[in-house]
Each structure stands twice: as structure tokens, then as C-alpha cells.
Image: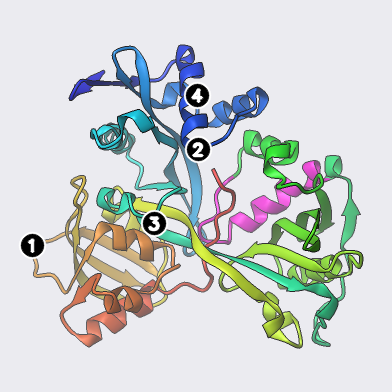
């Protein structure tokens, strides 16, 4: 138990359940369902969370759960996932968030996990704690009535209409194959699958229950919306291990003739627009961050992933929140890295939040340098760093938590 400015921090207990639920409902503007709340607690348990108290009143909460995340090169890394971060609106600007984050990151350091990740509800808060946006997702829509596929696009052979009960049985194995080769994707535990297929009405946005298409190498979960603006199909989740499965699933979705518009969230590098003879058909309605990351152990994190080019460089990393920064020698040969502290002069300087942003490959080194977030001693160093950190595929958040 720790205390700061009249606020006491301790681990959560089952007795805190009602107070934590009220705090979360108030902070996120929802009325949680008891069954849904129990599923969440199976992942992010109260006992693994941190409660902030003023007297006996719960005024802050954050929870943690270890996940396995795929990093560039297809390597699995155990990371700390944070969720349910909330401070009571009656207790803002009192340092409660910083106190909870200080304690949470101390615990993560003790566990020796190289990365901490979370999905952020606000974008202007977490840079000061060393986090950077590390995965982007693109929201799109198109009118399927005008979708003409290129002649070489595979037919929807292998795609089947699948009852949701059967989809619950077969989809997790397909997802697991997909997430092992996609940077940013995480292992998905049973409580998360249960929550997805429970399909609580609160998450339907006025749409129908889930429908499913399955393919030996992919699946699409979708629902129908009947709105004043027109009938639409919402693709809730589409995962494809192969490009043939990807094309076949989209062909099947575009064959749902009673609904005009299709809406989906895709990766920025998704080839969907180029399946069509008119790529302008696919309109981007939003592009936003899906995951934020912080390196807790720079050498451990940098040696966990693969690189596209050899590299010999000294990097100075500034950490405004914890003690993970320093000057590190990074040497890459045949895709794998060695990294260790050094006393040599730095070739490149950047914040640990920027390192989090470029780590999974969503953001280019050059873009960050152009924004004056990375300083390199010369153009050759910048070019080499940019090339090495590029990835074959954009990272994708496997499931939101």
C-alpha cells in the first residue's frame, strides 16, 4: 500500500467490485451488464488492478493483464496490457493518474516485461508517460452495388455461411494462425472470445446479431443495419491467413444484394481497394490510432523483433517517466539485433514514446524525423535507421481490450 497527497493506492479486492463498476460506468458513459462485467473480470481481475482511495472512497482504478503480442518478424513477446484506466471526475488534476501509473509500471518492471500496451480513449494524455501510438486502423465504406472485381480476383470458393455457434468453434483456430504472422496481433483468451460471440446488444449499434462467413483460411463476422440513410453491412471482424481467403471473403460479402453499403475497419495496407476495377470506390471515413505502446526495457524490446536491413548505430532514448532511457548500441545482422548500453556518442536521439510509435512498423522513422521527433547526425544514419525499421506488413490490433 502506498500513499500520496491524501490518496492511498492498493491492489483491488472483490469487495471493490461495485465501486469500481460505478467509477467505470461514470467515466466511460456506459451502464455495464453484470454478465459482461464478469467476463471482463476474468481477464482484467480486480486483484491485478490498482485502486486509488480517498478515505474509503474509490476515486481511481487501473487494471493489467499479460498478453502475447506478435512483433515484426513473427516473434511472440509477452507484454503488459493496461485497461479500465479511470479517475473520478470529482478528483481530476490531483496527480491520481500519475500515482497509479507509477505504481503500475513499477509492478511491470518487476515482472520483467519489455512492453506495455493499451487502447487509449484520449490522445493527449499518455505521451508524458512514454507512450506513442503504434497501430493505426482505417475505417472505410463503399457501395457494393458498384463493386466490380478484377478478372484475376479469386472466386469465393471455400466460403461458407456458418451458424454463429459453429463459428465460435472454428474461428479461434483460424485467428490463432493469423495472429502468429501479423505484427501487432495478440493471442486471444477464452473470455475475450466469449465476449465477442456473446454479442451484447450494447455493442451492436442498433444492428442485428452477428452473422458469419468462414473459409479454411479466414472468416468474416458481420451484421446488418437498417437505417434511414440506407441498408448497410457492418464487417465487425475479417481475418484472412492468405490473400485468396481475403479476396474470397470480400466477394461473398459483396454478394449480399439486399444491402447497398458496406462498412469495415481495415489496416492501412489492406489490398481491398485494389481488388476492384475502381479503387476510388473505397472511401476512408476515419484513420486513427488503435494501440499505444511503451518500451519498458529498450534492449529486450529491440532484440525481440526482426529488421529489414543491417544496422550499426548508437541511439539515445529519453524517458520522461521511468528509467528505461539511456544510450544504446544497436547492431543488426541478418534481421536480428543485439542491443546494450554504451558510453559512445549517439548517432540518433529520440523519445521513448517515439520509439514506441515506430516499434511495430505503423510509423516511419523518416516521418517522425520530419516532425522533429527524431534527430540524426546525418542523412546516411537516418536512411539506414528508416530502412531497418520498415516492416513487410502493417501492424493490426487483433482484438480491442
- Which residue is tagged 4? 22
Q: Quadrant of residue 309?
A: bottom left
The part of the chain drawn in magenta is 167-187
Name the element at disc 3.
helix
Instruction: Give residue 134's position: percent from left, percent from top.
Output: 42, 60
What is the x, y in percent for residue 26?
A: 49, 31
* Most foreground residue, 182 or 353: 353
Q: Name the residue under label 1.
A: 343
Say the numbered circle drawn on residue 277. none
At mark 1, the secondary structure is loop
Q: In this view, does 247 lie above or below 116?
A: below
Whole-angstrom CA distance, mark 1 to mark 4, is 51 Å
The residue indicated by pointer 3 is 304
Q: Give the residue displayed 8% in from the left and 62% down from the top.
A: 343
**Front position among marks 4 and 3:** 4
The C terminus - image quarter: top right
Disc 4 is placed on an element classified as helix
Label 3 near label 1: C-beta < 8 Å? no
Looking at the image, residue 341 sits to the left or right of residue 78; the answer is left
Query: Which mark sits nearer the N-terminus, 2 or 4?
Result: 4
Quadrant housing the N terminus: top left
Label 4 crowd (10 A; few <14 / some 14-19 / many >=20): some
User: Are the two marked residues, 3 and 2, in contact with CB atoms closer than 8 angstroms?
Assistant: no
Q: Is residue 193 left or right of residue 79?
A: right
Q: What element carries label 2?
A: helix
Residue 28's disc is 2
Across and down, in percent, residue 200 comes to: 71, 36
Amino acid at each position: 500500500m502506498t500513499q500520496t497527497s491524501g490518496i492511498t493506492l492498493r491492489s483491488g479486492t472483490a469487495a471493490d467490485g461495485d465501486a469500481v463498476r460505478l467509477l467505470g460506468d461514470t467515466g466511460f458513459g456506459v451502464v455495464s451488464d453484470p454478465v459482461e462485467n464478469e467476463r471482463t473480470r476474468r481477464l482484467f481481475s480486480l486483484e491485478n488492478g490498482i485502486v486509488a482511495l480517498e478515505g474509503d472512497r474509490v476515486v481511481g482504478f487501473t487494471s493489467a493483464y499479460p498478453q502475447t503480442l506478435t512483433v515484426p518478424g513473427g516473434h511472440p513477446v509477452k507484454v503488459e496490457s493496461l485497461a479500465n484506466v479511470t479517475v473520478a471526475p470529482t478528483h481530476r488534476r490531483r496527480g491520481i493518474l500519475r500515482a497509479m501509473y507509477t505504481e503500475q509500471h513499477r509492478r511491470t518492471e518487476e515482472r520483467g516485461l519489455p512492453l506495455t500496451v493499451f487502447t487509449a480513449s484520449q490522445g493527449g494524455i499518455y505521451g508524458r508517460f512514454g507512450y506513442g501510438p503504434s497501430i493505426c486502423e482505417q475505417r472505410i465504406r463503399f457501395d457494393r452495388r458498384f463493386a466490380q472485381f478484377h478478372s484475376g480476383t479469386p472466386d469465393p470458393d471455400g466460403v461458407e455461411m456458418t451458424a454463429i455457434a459453429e463459428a465460435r468453434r472454428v474461428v479461434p483456430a483460424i485467428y490463432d494462425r493469423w495472429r502468429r504472422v501479423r505484427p501487432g496481433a495478440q493471442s486471444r483468451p477464452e473470455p475475450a472470445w466469449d465476449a465477442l460471440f456473446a454479442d451484447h446488444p450494447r455493442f451492436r449499434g442498433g444492428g442485428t446479431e452477428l452473422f458469419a462467413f468462414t473459409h479454411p483460411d479466414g472468416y468474416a463476422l458481420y451484421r446488418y443495419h437498417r437505417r434511414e440513410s440506407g441498408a448497410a453491412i457492418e464487417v465487425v471482424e475479417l481475418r484472412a491467413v492468405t490473400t485468396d481467403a481475403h479476396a474470397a471473403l470480400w466477394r461473398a460479402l459483396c454478394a449480399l444484394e439486399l444491402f447497398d453499403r458496406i462498412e469495415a475497419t481495415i489496416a492501412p495496407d489492406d489490398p481491398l481497394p485494389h481488388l476492384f476495377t475502381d479503387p476510388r470506390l473505397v472511401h476512408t471515413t476515419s484513420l486513427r490510432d488503435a494501440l499505444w505502446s511503451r518500451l519498458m526495457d529498450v534492449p529486450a524490446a529491440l532484440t525481440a523483433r526482426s529488421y529489414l536491413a543491417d544496422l550499426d548505430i548508437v541511439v539515445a532514448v529519453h524517458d520522461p517517466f521511468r528509467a528505461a532511457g539511456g544510450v544504446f548500441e544497436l547492431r543488426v545482422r541478418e534481421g536480428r539485433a543485439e542491443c546494450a548500453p554504451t558510453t559512445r556518442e549517439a548517432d540518433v536521439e529520440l523519445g521513448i514514446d517515439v520509439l514506441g510509435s515506430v516499434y511495430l512498423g505503423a510509423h516511419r522513422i523518416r516521418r517522425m524525423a520530419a516532425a522533429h521527433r527524431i534527430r540524426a547526425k546525418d542523412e546516411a544514419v537516418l536512411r539506414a535507421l528508416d530502412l531497418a525499421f520498415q516492416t513487410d506488413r502493417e501492424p493490426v490490433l487483433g482484438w480491442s481490450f
